[in-house]
Image (tube, grey):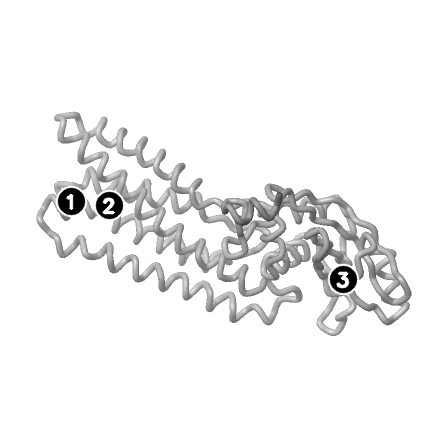
Amino acid sequence: MFKYGYIIVPAIIIGFLSRLSMLKVDYRQYPSYPQGVFSHLTLGIIASALGSVAVPAIVSNEFSAFTFLALAAQQFRDVRSMERQSLDNIEPTELVQRGTAYIEDIAKAFEARNYVTMLVSLITSITIYLISKFNVSIVYSVAGGIIIGGIAFFLLNRSISRQNIEEIADVKPATISFNGATLRINDIPIMNVGLEASREIYLRNGIAVEIIPYDENGITTLSNIGQRQAIVHNAAILLGLRKDVDEPDFAPIARRNSHTGSVVMVIVALEPDVECLVEAVKKTLVLESAKRKPLQTYIGRKAAD
């Protein structure tokens, strides 16, 4: 196996770099830094190593080594379970919870990224080996493998990328008003706010938006409760929240207009900038478990007409 070092080493490096580029610690702070990042980078090294040794193992008739790929698939499924359990454990500590749909989406994303890492490393090693069979120097073989590996990463990463809300709906500022004790957003009843002091805070510091789907696909996607909870959580993280555990009046909420399919959302934010709220909602991911496409069916298209 050592004589295939010119295949294994570049494949591991490209695979690891692909995992590194997909690992981002942003405002969501998940994975956490540095412990969560270290764990995922370690898994990235393992995934790239497994992908890189597959070709040398087959060429060397070491078929037992090739079975590690099947073992890796099982381990990466365990990664999904681990991420889900970790997020479930910390969910009660959130002022605005992510919701089970968002947690499942995060867990599936981490599993898929390990598969991408392994495939990029595997494709790189296959390319290097095939080019070297044409009596091409090692330098050109490795260069070709790196180029093809980079292209493979771009295509695979693009294939698992997710949409944002702005791709399925328009987001516009909305008006907050009260009809007695009933909070209304663009004249859509939201909830009852009994305390007059709380109503004054809503009128002074509250901001709201209306999310208007472009088509039936967007209407069905936004009807998912998990998708709306993800939007609310994302907005609360970015804008801050004027709420503590004993202030249920100020919990951000998203309600669906059952007549049009649009969704209105209100939040009492620490930074009450409605334009920032619009951008926060637009940049929220469309959850894989919430995404629906009825317009791709005959019945859905006929009903929409």
**Left or right: where does residue 299 sit relative to residue 3?**
right
Residue 301 in which image quadrant: top right
**Left or right: where does residue 57 sit relative to residue 180?**
left
- Residue depicted at 61% across the width and 70% down the height: 93
Residue pointed to by mark 2 = 52
Residue 256 in which image quadrant: bottom right
Determine crowd level at label 1: few under 14, some 14-19, many 20+ residues with C-alpha closer than 10 A: many
- Residue depicted at 77% across the width and 52% down the height: 208
Q: SS at mark 3?
A: loop
When the figure is inspected, residue 104 is found, relative to residue 212, above or below; the finding is: below
Residue pointed to by mark 1 = 56
Residue 79 in which image quadrant: bottom left
Identify which amino acid the numbered label 3 is placed on: Arg
User: Which tag, 3 or 1, sits closer to the chain's start?
Assistant: 1
Residue pointed to by mark 3 = 242
Residue reaching furthest to the bottom: 246
Q: SS at mark 1?
A: helix
Q: CA distance from mark 3 to mark 1?
A: 59 Å
Q: SS at mark 2?
A: helix
**Left or right: where does residue 177 sit relative to residue 35?**
right
Residue 202 or 121: which is nearer the viewer?
202
Residue 28, image x and y in percent?
Answer: 58, 55
CB atoms of marks 1 and 2 within 8 Å: yes
Disc on res. 123: none
- Residue depicted at 79% across the width and 49% down the height: 174
Identify which amino acid the numbered label 2 is placed on: Ser
Q: CA distance from mark 2 to mark 3?
A: 51 Å
**Left or right: where does residue 122 sit relative to residue 36?**
left
When the figure is inspected, residue 14 is found, relative to residue 183, above or below; the finding is: above
Residue 119 or 238: which is nearer the viewer?
119
Residue 39, image x and y in percent?
Answer: 40, 58
Q: Which quadrant of the figure contains the C terminus?
A: top right
